[in-house]
Amino acid sequence: MGFTTKQVHAGVTPDKETGSILTPIYQATTFVQESVDQYLSKGFSYSRSGNPTVRALEQKLAVLENGVAATCYATGMAAEQVVFQACLSAGDHAVVSDVAYGGTYRLCTKILARFGVQFTFADSSNPDAVRKAVRDNTKLIFTETPANPTLKLGDIAAISKIAKERGIPHAVDNTFLTPYYQRPLELGANISVHSTTKYFDGHNATVGGAVIVDSKELDQKIRFIQNATGVIMSPFVAWLTLQGTKTLSIRIERQSANAQVIAEFLESHPKVTQVRYPGLESFPQHALAKSQASGFGAMLWFEVQGGVKAGKKLMDSVKLCTLAENLGSVETLITHPVTMTHADVEPAERKRVGITDGLVRLSVGLEDVEDLIADLSQALDKI
Amino acid sequence: MKKETRVTHPPEIKLLGGNVPVVTPVYRTVKFTFPTIESSLSAEAKESGFDYTRDSNPTTREVELTAAALQDRDDALATATGMAATWLALLGNLEAGDHAVLFVESYRPNRVAIRRFLSKLGIEFTMIGLHDHAAIEREFARDSTKLVLFEAPTNPMVQVPDLERITALARRHDVVTVLDNTFAGLHQHGRYDIDYFVHSMTKYASGHGDVMGGVVIADQKRIKALRPLAVNMGSTLDPGAAFLIGRGLKTYFLRYRQHSANAQAIAEFLVKRPEVAKVFYPGLPSDPGHALARKQMTDFGGVLSFDLRDSPREKTWAFIDALELFTTTASLGSTESLVAPAKLYLGSDLSAEEQKRALLEDSTVRLAVGIEHVDDLIADLTQALDKIFG
């Protein structure tokens, strides 16, 4: 069955009681058991442990990622946190992309490190660097590709091979490309992590997260933490995400096409010193982008002449592009990672991983691309 | 302040200038207030202020103005359902003694509104054929004729009216035109001289099969004149529903064009099948409405109908029941593909002779094509045809 068919139908069956074509929002805390003997015979007891609306989304996401099972969370960070907790205990070590999202870095260094978990932030664009970072007590490799905001890629198959040799899971944050363009589990990874806030919702209306795994055993470990820590997705958010997912492919296809045009425009603009977009010939890992994903996504970054000052001027001058965090939604959003998403990362660490002071991140939306280029063009003229 | 008071007067959250949500919130409030009585009476407050959600609400207003912009008009009025929008346009323009024109090919509830209900209020009507231009001219020329209600294309047989011709005749004879433009969508037909567009926003506008809503779109003068009736009738769209429709509108073009591309491929598949006697889809070059549709439209929509060959009612129903991806139900314009027995669902108010004129046969199947992968939809149609006719 085609992806676009699965994104509409997977996980959703007409309601048995009424025939409602959509899964209802089961806004209920608890589920009545017919008898003590039949406890859990219908699959649900308490919404922290499982809810039918959330379950429908979990099943849809598992199908789309070609996984065995999925779990959903209050936010993308909650999803990550559960993966770390399910895989790591005091004394364990994890290898994490050095270009991982600022929130991941903060979770590792400020929270999990307090509980005796050790981390190495390795250059995940180089499988050898990942291999060298693995120790005897390494229990998880966590990568993000493309990375936020640098767009550095990790070779999913090569890193998964390293993980497999050591018998440890490889988790990939697949938020930037979604399973429509990239399916880490098919490339050998064991866990795919998402902020559903981004492309799955796509309308800037919810925050949520998901973890899709390739085995029942991993799912059980993860579900245990999900239930114990209670960082669950609400039925209403699950319902909105179910609906958003139905247009995932057509949104990201158009957004990516827009991003390609904008990247090419920026690359030829005299005031732009550098553009990074996986779909550009000039992108250092263009070949890897083409081989492990079927599309390039809608995230790009660029640097303007004149450093921070010029970058700020640009961001204050755009009218259609909205100055806001988040990405993957229908609205084009523009951010300055150094002062926004990556403010918690130490300057030396930022510099090391390539987040320069003048880097401007663009999450390209669904608008008419000519309108977006006109907006960027007038803003660049003001520098 | 005592805590008992505090719960009904929660601390105020002030948004700093310029610090605003990217998405308009659901204004889940019945009432709006002004700092002083004086300010509530200002011209500006009367023009664009908010008072009571039955009158207007910011979340709903955003949907109204978006719909108006797409339809090339400057104002709109959102309603609880598409039928509420049709009713508003009818009641706002007709009174006892007036005569209305409607068409046998129309959507059943549109016909029922006039034939069964408005007729009780002393409104006369004539039901003619959409392509019978002589009859249209004759009926428009009657002194008492006040309004025409029509669709482009029609539901369910996707018949295409000649908009230029009908609107010119209407203008000449001072007949108010109400076009149910749901099938063509919000982005088409705006350049024609239509007085009122009505839409079921339950369909392509919201697009996800999760909310009901309607809208009347016209120039500001007409909408202003209609609003007191809407406020009095209370057919207001709920802000929660408006939020979902607004959210749906953001992918409107992507969805509408995908629906159209899928429907085109399915229509082309069906005309080649020996089990299919006739396919009705304006995007097909062989369709009698094709030339007109090409002139009037850029996208032909997601609905098509077809007649199965030598297929009595039971066989047609068996075919519909054999489909797996297409869900048997009314409605259209949502991400999921739907199928309906056209005569049973959409022709029950007509006599046998009228059903024939409306092109509704026992063998007629209506498809509301979704945005799934078209190969899967064609595979489903193939297996059902093979199963029932093989």
Image (tube, rainbow, N blue to C red):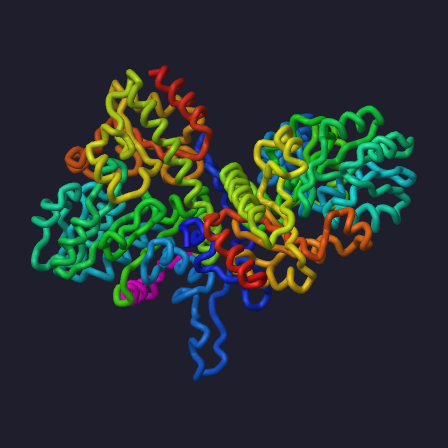
User: Vertical placement of A57 versus B237: above or below?
Assistant: below
Residue sitting at x 67%, y 39%:
B153
Residue A309 visible somewhere in the drawing: no
Q: Nearer the viewer, residue A8 or B103?
A: B103
Query: Residue B111 or A151: which is nearer the viewer?
Result: B111
Q: Does the image show residue B190?
A: yes
Task: State the residue in front, B216 or A183.
Answer: A183
Picture residue at 58% right of the left edge, 61% below the top: B389
Residue B173 on image: x %, y %? 85, 27
Outermost residue to the bottom: A37
Q: In this view, does A163 lie to the left or right of A69?
A: left
In which quarter of the view is residue A291 placed?
A: top left
| A231 part of magenta stretch | yes
The location of residue B241, given as percent across then percent down, is 59, 47
Residue A350 at x, y percent in the picture: 19, 35
**Residue at image x 17%, y 50%?**
A159
Q: In this view, does A289 lie to the left or right of B198?
A: left
Which residues are drawn in magenta?
A: A219-233
